[in-house]
Image (cartoon, rainbow, N blue to C red):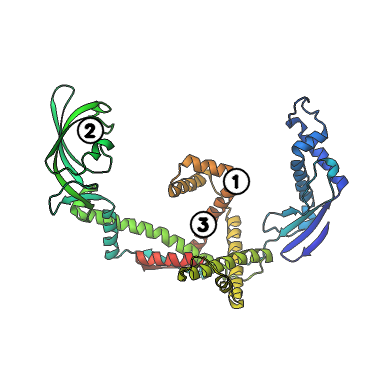
Amino acid sequence: MRVLKNERLEKEVLLTLSKSDLERDVLTELLSQSHQVKKHGFRSGKIPPSLLFQERGQQAIDAVVHKAVSNAADEIIGDKPLGAPLGYQIENPFTGSSLNDLVDLDVKVHAVFAPEMGEIVWKDVHLDRCVPVPTEQEVDASMAERAGRVMTSVALDEKRPAAIGDTLVYTMTYTHKDGTVKEMEGSFRLGSNTLPEEFEKTLEGITEGYIVSEGIKVPGDFPDKSLAGKKVNFKINFREIRQTVPHQANEEFAKSQGFDTLAALREVVRKSLVDSGDVLSGMILRDSLKKKLGTVQAFDVPESWMQSALSVLKRDAERKALGSQSDDSTDESTDESAVASSKLTPVQESALAEKAVARVRANCVIQKVVRDQRFSVSDAELFAYAKAMAQSEGRPIDEVVGFLRRNKNVVERISNEIQERKALDWMSGQCTIEDKEVSFDGLKDLFAASEDSI
């Protein structure tokens, strides 16, 4: 074992497994698995090592390396607390096909130690919490947007033949199976396939008062369930052709949505804006706290963590600079000068380095709170996350759950996000908070600004 780097927060060791030890331990590992391997012509547990190696050689090598790193862990780590699981990488991966091809194997082991942090006096951390207070104009706009998603109809300014999209108002008569004549009034939008497609096509261009007698197979959602799925002779009088338009936010619309008055609908819309604002407010508060955590206490962080955070920040900054130049250019191709000008200046790199250190410090504080408060993630919380994923992506929940079961790394990332949110919510509850009223549009602007700065 040879130490490559030994700093206060990081240590790298080159662990060499000799060919002889590797052959012995891999053979032992293969023999321990021999009863799990089935091979035509051989009894269970009696397969020759050479054939076992062909079946499970790489898995056996991986197991031996993992065991060797675990055995050396105490000597590598010493009495320092780890800040992340011990990582390792085989420097010269095995490329042979038999036990005899094995060579000395070099494994680089990387240990990152937890930074030393002092206690944070949470009440000294001051945060602003946005309280959503929608303006009357915002409520009006939301009501208009909601009404605009629902279609209604109005009388034509001038009589004309029916066109796709028009609303046809009709009176329909038919003979019930008991011999009585039934009459039913209704309307539908031409082209919406409310009636059989072939029948609707014949209605384009008709005028008011057009009467049709037709044998139609009754759809399953027909009001008279006794006729559903059967072919029935209908006489339909198209009494009026109306223009289809979005609803206006008025009393008529409120009643069409099941409200007694427009004022009652207005209060529901206002509450919906407040509820949406509360969600944005919580996200803004957590983001604001996370930024403050990076500067509330100074402590050394592992260089590899800082460099990893810095590379992400630099890549995002360069992409943003390149994207803004592409937007300003009429040339669809990106030339070399644009790429060169997107590179960061030394001053910009220095600022990003400070931001990277702050980001790592914030993550260190968050992980310490997660450990100290023992925040865990339940199956119910993971399932709720999966349902939200399915809804946002328009996919069946079973498909999303199946994907998560096959991708444990995604589940781990989701679990970390849930734990982080719990930790930030806990911390914000300990801080000194001042409530500030903000309009709904103001909240959206603050949220967009926080998203851009992440």
Residue lying at 79% horizontally and 39% vertically, measured from the top left: 29
Q: Amino acid at mark 3?
A: Arg
User: Are there few (<14), some (14-19), or many (20+) residues within 10 Å of tag 2?
Assistant: few
Q: Nearer the viewer, residue 249 or 55?
A: 55
Can you identify the residue that label 2 sits on? 223
Q: Given the current orientation, which residue lies at the most extreme bottom position?
A: 347
Can you identify the residue that label 1 sits on? 408
Query: What secondary structure is marked by label 3?
Result: helix
Q: Nearer the viewer, residue 295 or 383?
A: 383
Residue lying at 25% horizontally and 30% vertically, measured from the top left: 218
Q: Given the current orientation, which residue lies at the most extreme right position?
A: 20
User: Which of the two marks, 2 or 3, is nearer to us in this view?
Assistant: 2
Can you identify the residue that label 3 sits on? 421
Residue 133: image location, x then y, percent = 33, 64
Q: Amino acid at mark 1?
A: Lys
User: Which of the two marks, 1 or 3, is nearer to us in this view?
Assistant: 1
Q: Is residue 125 left or right of residue 100?
A: left
Residue 184: image location, x then y, percent = 16, 35
User: Are there few (<14), some (14-19), or many (20+) residues within 10 Å of tag 1?
Assistant: few
Q: CA distance from mark 2 to mark 1?
A: 49 Å
Q: Nearer the viewer, residue 159 or 296?
A: 159
